[in-house]
Image (cartoon, coloured by chain):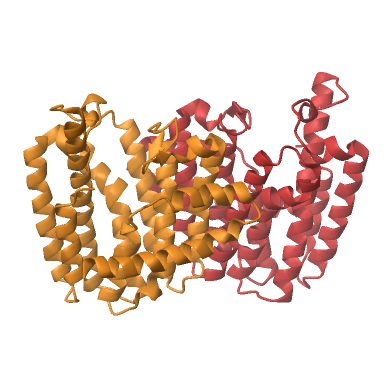
Chain colours: A orange, B red
Amino acid sequence: MLSERLTQYSELTEHKLGELLSESEHAPILQESMAYSVFSGGKRVRPALCMAACELCGGTPEDALLAACALEMIHTYSLIHDDLPAMDNDDMRRGKPSNHKAFGEANAILAGDGLLSLAFYALSQCPQADALAAISKGAFEMVLGQSLDINSGGDESLLRQLQDYKTGALFRAAVGAGAACAGAIGEQREALTRFANAYGLLFQITDDILDFEGDASVLGKTVGKDAEEGKTTFVTIYGLDQAKEFAKQYAHEAREAVLQTGGDAAFFCELISYTLTRKS
Amino acid sequence: MLSERLTQYSELTEHKLGELLSESEHAPILQESMAYSVFSGGKRVRPALCMAACELCGGTPEDALLAACALEMIHTYSLIHDDLPAMDNDDMRRGKPSNHKAFGEANAILAGDGLLSLAFYALSQCPQADALAAISKGAFEMVLGQSLDINSGGDESLLRQLQDYKTGALFRAAVGAGAACAGAIGEQREALTRFANAYGLLFQITDDILDFEGDASVLGKTVGKDAEEGKTTFVTIYGLDQAKEFAKQYAHEAREAVLQTGGDAAFFCELISYTLTRKS
């Protein structure tokens, strides 16, 4: 069921993103550079969470489609700007040259700015004002997290708060906006927010574990690239075993929270299990 | 009267911007870098246009205050990103080191991203959905214009369209959002949009003239820095006299349009005269 619904959500998202990006046809290079990163094999996790939250609260996936696309555009802009030489200076993203490698730095900055602006233009066509509140808050908190990250000097005590902003904020935005698009308020939405908080940490920890294990298997090393580069992750601080233990705990918390919504939580439970054991 | 109302608008804007920027107190460097550029002596033209449009359509300046602040944050983010080394590479802005010179490139990118996100978070508290539509469209068109600019190779035939996006779009957004905050639709709002189209060109041309004359008086040269750097402006293409003639024409068009609103156009007429003869 997981893959069926993920496919449905993903197809809706791809189609609508294509429509929304055609708004930029007057500036071909902007359009091309935005599309390059938007259609580069992203898993569309945030749109799926948004549409699934909307369904759980009694709406249809289509009710949340504009919000879902806005979230994906915001996620994509953040990756483009994160990869810039002045930030993480990553030459590759999802197996392709990163945006600034393909289009140059100036166009990459504008591709990010364009996607962030276009996301809110898409939201202006969404009748639920609460979706805008959830998503703009998430977008801003993500920048807060990024700023804490680059200025914290690897302070370990900040790791959870930092990841709560960097990754958690857009997950909270996704379920909050999805619930808003179904007209949900109160307890159901609060439970979904608790789910997003736990799921965000689960997602980040499993990402850190995958990075570590990927490096270890490829390089035959006992420390990953993150540790070598001085990055602070759940694995570099707590070690692999403890990180895996945390992942299980957050998966449990996420499951408990989503069951408290009182809605059909099957999709979310499968997604949690999938994320806990994911290989990519 | 012009300066009285400008002072009133400006005071409202400064106060509210201070409140809005306090949202970022969890990340001190982000807050500092955003505030550095937001409070650096900007003339608050876009907020003034927004609040004046709201008043012309029967609202109060306060009705349009969130939209006005959003516009100023968006304008400021665009200046921060424009100044980056990969873009215009400007070390100074309004007599101070530009944002990336003061805080480094990574923090400057985030200050821009943060202001753009925070602008829409402020708008999520504004009850008029149409203000979001006007402002997000303007924000996106501004990026379109910037992209055309850096990729057009100085194509003269694109100058008007490019400036219509780069400068005009946020002026259109300002009056459109202001009118929306007063609940105005139809003819009054359309006349304000025509005003913004003409006023945007007037503003840009007088900017080009000031740049040219500033260079000429300081450097004792007959061509300005823009021409030397290969920039395409109204002065480099048409010469100083023709550019001044265009400025008068657009001032006339702007005045005609604002008179067609049927509202109290005195403030706008004074602003047009002031812009036509401005010395800074």
Q: Residue at x 22, y 67 (%)?
A: A2
Residue B155 at least partly seen: yes
Q: Is residue A204 left or right of residue A33?
A: left
Q: In this view, which residue lies farthest toward the bottom?
A: A58
Residue B245: image location, x then y, percent: 92, 46
Q: Residue at x 68, y 71 (%)?
A: B57
Q: Is residue A111 left or right of residue A142?
A: right
Residue B14 at least partly seen: no
Establish if B240 lies above or below A131. Answer: above
Count of numbered marks: 0
In the foreground, A145 or B273: A145
Q: Is residue A174 left or right of residue B178?
A: left
Q: Quadrant of residue A231?
A: top left
Residue B104: image location, x then y, percent: 46, 28
Q: In this view, which residue lies farthest toward the top?
A: B219
Residue A78: image location, x then y, percent: 41, 46
In the foreground, B65 or A181: A181
Q: Residue at x 57, y 52 (%)?
A: A31
For the N terminus of chain A, the image quarter is: bottom left
